[in-house]
């Protein structure tokens, strides 16, 4: 090349990273070896966002070439600019080194006349150039907060970095002097920093440019892509091969950009989606929106109020739900930071308002203090647990006034939620949610469901989040099951059966004597041969009859 051509090409490369990458950068392909990097449309759009926005957050599937793209962008940045500082943090050492390794490959593959600066430091974790620019990698997210200043911070697989949530507040000062952030990740549930940054960005609330890329945007992966009629989702021959043997959660996390379905949540994505469908605004709010009313009390209805207390000055909230017992609909909710004496006043007020609702209180250390204040207030309808009672075998407790010495000595006020009891309560809550036999209208409850995760075999709130509304709800379904169970369990079973049953109408033309004119035999009133028919009775093969009306109780109103 002539000197003039070289000069012009250097100028063009310095101005246009897309041209530099496509013309001069090489990447290492696992099968084809060292090959030119030819960017796809979705990568070009991402590059444009890197250039025009200081803060970028990328939601992506696996195997889309974003590590290569980030490395190529960094190569351009440190080669054509002086004193650029780049830090890449990732989930583990090998991942953190990948961008540095790819930058090294790119620098060594470009023409010598394009190497405007020489490499002065080159090791597994860092590269420095003679123009003062450098890139370093780290597995410790705290390093980002300790750095004095960065030109660019790259966070690879941000949703999967342990401890990243804790240091996020320390990262922004790092780039306050005009630096940039590129945050990339596959999803890993909701409630973590990556999820919050991305969702806030989509609502234009945090200054980040949100970039979402789907797997079928890759030209090779999207060949023959179509909507799978069985799932309603995109599929292709490549996708079927790649996801063979994968669980639904793995597919959601690795390929479908699905925040909710990707997390290791105690409640399935389907259950959470159902609660979201039932969600509605409160008809009234009290105590600065801490108390929310969804339905006013109805004369003659039974209610249960379940309470999980906190000290009022820590991270946890004090929380309670009020349920209408027969329908198990949430009619009221409280969540906020009150001291035990003030919280007892709130729950006593709600309980009296809802027809002296049966009050159930978790009797941990804070709960015992709340119970004492409830006793002082003389609440008339408190749950007492019987010492030594075994679930499924013994009567677990009884109801009495909240007074001193109001019950025999083998009855203790409240319910213990530790050990086996906790698992039983949570499993019952999950079961009733799954079968549609308990109904929540609160966005706060749904939000806790999204961040209630399995952690070493124990379901609990994600670090930094709360589960007080979930635990108070678990109390409610547990006592309803064990105290009111004989009255309502058959209705719950009938609801589940009806929800899972599909009916079809067939005009019988084959049996001798049956009317061939459907108008002559009203299907809801007459049997096959014109005799009166009870629509709730089914005749079994052995000749015995089952009356489903007796099973359904009040769930199916009987006519006539």
Image (cartoon, rainbow, N blue to C red):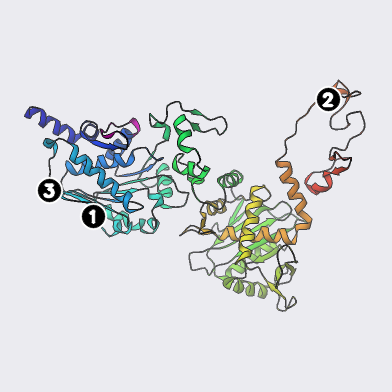
The image shows residue 127 at horizontal and vertical percentages of 20, 49
Location of residue 410 (image quadrant)? bottom right
Which callout, 2 or 1, points at the residue further toward the start of the chain?
Answer: 1
**Which residue matches tag 1?**
149
The image shows residue 366 at horizontal and vertical percentages of 57, 71
**Which residue matches tag 2?**
508
Q: Are marks 3 and 2 in contact (CB under 8 Å)?
A: no
Say which of 9 and 286 sits in front.
9
* Figure disc tally: 3
Say which of 403 and 164 sits in front.
164
For mark 1, give the secondary structure.
loop
Q: Disc 1 and disc 3: Cα gap in Å?
A: 19 Å
> Where 424 falls versus 529 (above or below)?
below
Q: On the picture, is 152 further left or further right than 394? A: left
Which callout, 3 or 2, points at the residue further toward the start of the chain?
Answer: 3
For the question of whether residue 250 can be seen, the reply is yes
For mark 2, give the secondary structure.
loop
Q: On the picture, is 213 further left or further right than 293? A: left
Near mark 2 (Cα within 10 A), the count class, few <14, some 14-19 or many ≥20, is few
Span highlighted in magenta in the image: 31-42
The image shows residue 215 at horizontal and vertical percentages of 42, 35
**Which residue matches tag 3?**
130
Please tell me the numbered disc located at residue 137.
Answer: none
């Amino acid at each position: 090349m002539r000197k003039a051509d070289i000069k012009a090409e250097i100028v063009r490369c310095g101005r246009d990273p897309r041209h530099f990458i496509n013309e001069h950068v090489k990447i290492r392909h696992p099968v084809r070896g060292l090959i030119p990097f030819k960017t796809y449309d979705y990568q070009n759009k991402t590059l444009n966002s890197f250039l025009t926005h200081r803060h970028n957050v990328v939601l992506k599937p696996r195997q889309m070439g974003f590590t290569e793209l980030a490395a190529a962008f960094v190569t351009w940045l440190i080669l054509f600019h002086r004193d650029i500082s780049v830090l890449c943090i990732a989930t583990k050492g090998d991942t953190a080194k990948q961008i540095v390794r790819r930058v090294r490959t790119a620098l060594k593959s470009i023409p010598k006349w394009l190497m405007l600066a020489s490499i002065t430091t080159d090791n597994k974790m860092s590269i420095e150039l003679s123009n003062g620019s450098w890139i370093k990698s780290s597995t410790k997210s705290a390093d980002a907060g300790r750095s004095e200043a960065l030109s660019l911070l790259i966070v690879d697989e941000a949703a999967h970095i342990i401890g990243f949530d804790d240091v996020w507040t320390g990262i922004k000062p790092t780039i306050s002097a005009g630096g940039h952030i590129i945050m990339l990740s596959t999803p890993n549930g909701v409630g973590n920093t990556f999820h919050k940054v991305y969702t806030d960005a989509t609502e234009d609330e945090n200054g980040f440019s949100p970039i979402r890329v789907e797997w079928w945007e890759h030209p090779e992966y999207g060949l023959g892509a179509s909507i799978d009629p069985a799932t309603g989702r995109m599929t292709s021959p490549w996708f079927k091969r790649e996801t063979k043997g994968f669980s639904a959660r793995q597919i959601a996390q690795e390929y479908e950009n699905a925040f909710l379905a990707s997390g290791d949540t105690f409640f399935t994505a389907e259950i959470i989606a159902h609660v979201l469908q039932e969600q509605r605004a409160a008809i009234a709010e009290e105590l600065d929106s801490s108390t929310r009313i969804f339905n006013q009390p109805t004369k003659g209805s039974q209610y249960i109020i379940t309470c999980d207390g906190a000290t009022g000055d820590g991270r946890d909230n004090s929380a309670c739900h009020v349920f209408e017992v027969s329908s198990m609909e949430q009619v009221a909710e409280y969540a906020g930071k009150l001291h035990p004496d003030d919280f007892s006043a709130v729950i006593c007020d709600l309980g009296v308002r809802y027809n002296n609702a049966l009050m159930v209180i978790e009797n941990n250390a804070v709960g015992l203090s709340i119970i004492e204040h409830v006793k002082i207030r003389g609440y008339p309808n408190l749950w007492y647990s019987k010492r030594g009672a075994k679930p499924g075998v013994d009567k677990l407790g009884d109801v009495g006034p909240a007074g001193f010495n109001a019950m025999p000595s083998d009855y203790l006020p409240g319910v213990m939620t530790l050990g086996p009891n906790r698992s039983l309560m949570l499993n019952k809550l999950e079961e009733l949610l799954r079968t549609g036999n308990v109904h929540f209208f609160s966005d706060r409850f749904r939000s806790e469901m999204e961040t209630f995760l399995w952690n070493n075999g124990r379901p609990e709130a994600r670090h930094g989040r709360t589960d007080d509304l979930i635990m108070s709800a678990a109390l409610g379904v547990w006592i309803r099951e064990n105290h009111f169970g004989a009255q309502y369990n058959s209705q719950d079973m009938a609801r589940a059966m009806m929800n899972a049953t599909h009916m079809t109408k067939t005009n019988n033309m084959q049996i001798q004597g049956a009317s061939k004119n459907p108008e002559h035999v009203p299907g809801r009133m007459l049997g096959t041969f014109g005799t009166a028919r009870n629509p709730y009775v089914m005749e079994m093969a052995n000749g015995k009859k089952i009356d489903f009306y007796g099973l359904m109780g009040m769930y199916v109103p009987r006519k006539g």
